[in-house]
Image (cartoon, grey):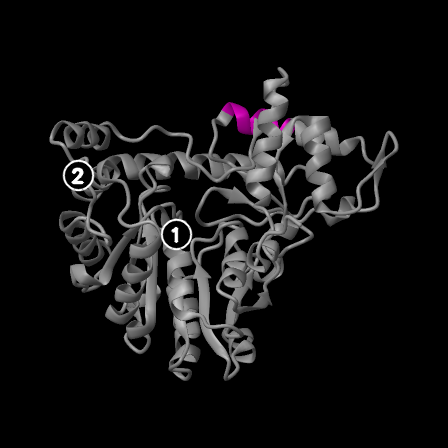
Amino acid sequence: MNSVSERLASLSPSETLAMSQKSNELKAKGIDVINMSVGEPDFFTPDHIKAAAKKAIEDNFSFYSPVPGYPALRKAIVEKLKRENGLEYKPEQIVCSNGAKQSVCNALLAIVDKGDEVIVPAPYWVSYVEMVKLAEGKNVIISAGIDQDFKITPAQLEAAITPKTKALILCSPSNPTGSVYSKEELKGLAEVLAKHPNVIILSDEIYEHINYVGKHTSMAEFEEIRDRVVIINGVSKAYAMTGWRIGWIAAPQWIASACSKLQGQYTSGPCSVSQKAAEAAYTGNQQPVEDMRAAFKRRRDLIVSLAKEIPGFKTATPEGAFYIFPECNAYFGTAHAGRKINNAADLAMYLLEEGHVASVGGAAFGAPNCLRFSYATSDENIIEAMKRVKETLAKLS
């Protein structure tokens, strides 16, 4: 009998990647699909970063790197944290991995034992809950709807903490909602966490620079909890380097050492050339980051104004990242040409096959009444996509 491990059988496939694949299959058949399912900047990596990668190849950076990354990259990250965030770390507290995704998974596998509870605010990024399962932990979901801008309150957090709570995963700016916790809101959560010294905070800050409301606040800025905050970040979103696969943690020494030990057994250090490119990203000209942020803000304004014109959509105005997450349950129970819409997954598939716009149903993010659209695409695509969505939904009754 061919059977995979229970560990693997318990995991769900990534719905974002599944929708992206379905969209690519339709494109391969010659259908003009606008893919708004995947969270990936559509910009090219800045030239000075590409030049550093070429130089790294010429300089023969083609050997294994240290497991937690080259000292020069870790030092560049330490300097970034001091310059941009006012935080003091040592290079030994930085562990570079094959993308921020591996960084999150490393941290969970390093601290979570079987049966430990991990608090995950919903809507959440699809992989968090699956990684907790992989670590044999138990997901404790706190739901925060559109009426509270998809952000949990200190009271909700306090109510979710039990003696079994090992960690909280917090993502701000958020994927999938684009919500950003203000400094005051984070302070409220930090005050709750200060009362529970056994809870580790995994602070996913990968969208740090795609922020439309001012300076980013890191959970590690709060003195009372700093010694148990694991910052997770990387170069993929801010520097348009998704395929380079460089993420990192800045963590208490014991967690950094544990993640390095774990990584040493299953991937070792990340790509040598990518690390030299990432070093150039952090030490070089930061203007491209601001240029891309400004473009995303313009697109945010465009897509929100168009989405608010779509009957049945309830759309919040995101303050960061590059997603809108409209509530769409007004369409549940409707039908067109014998095709019934029972849930957001049905609606996403209907929009893809009938309107040729790819989105992702909210159930994968713990918010079954919503759809996620990524606006990391051109203004022209945004205008055309929202036109198609509006016209396709109008057929439902």
Residue 390 percent location from the top left of the image: 69, 32
Assess disc 1: are there few (<14), some (14-19) or many (≥20) residues with their C-alpha within 10 Å of its C-alpha.
Answer: many
Residue occupying image coordinates x 18% and y 62%: 92
Residue 11 magenta-highlighted: no
In the displayed structure, does residue 324 sit left or right of residue 201? right
Q: Which residues are magenta?
A: 380-387
Q: Nearer the viewer, residue 118 or 265?
A: 265
In the displayed structure, does residue 131 sit left or right of residue 344? left
Amino acid beneath label 2: Gly
Quarter of the image for residue 160 reads bottom right
Residue at image mark 2: 284
- SS class of the residue under badge 2? loop
Q: Earlier in the sequence, mark 2 or mark 1?
A: 1
Amino acid beneath label 1: Gln
Vertical side of 269 occupied by 156: above or below? below
Q: Residue lying furthest right in this view?
A: 338
Vertical side of 357 occupied by 252: above or below? below
How many labels were placed on the picture?
Answer: 2
Residue occupying image coordinates x 36% and y 39%: 293
Residue occupying image coordinates x 23% and y 29%: 50
Q: Nearer the viewer, residue 177 or 138?
A: 138
User: From mark 2 to mark 1, how far is it between C-alphas?
Assistant: 25 Å
Residue 100 percent location from the top left of the image: 37, 50
Q: Main secondary structure of the magenta part?
A: helix
Residue 393 percent location from the top left of the image: 74, 34
Do the residues bearing badges 2 and 1 touch, measured as CB atoms within 8 Å? no
Vertical side of 251 occupied by 28: above or below? above
Tag on residue 102? 1
Tag on residue 147? none
In the displayed structure, does residue 232 sit left or right of residue 178? left
Assess disc 2: are there few (<14), some (14-19) or many (≥20) residues with their C-alpha within 10 Å of its C-alpha.
Answer: few
Image quarter of the C terminus: top right
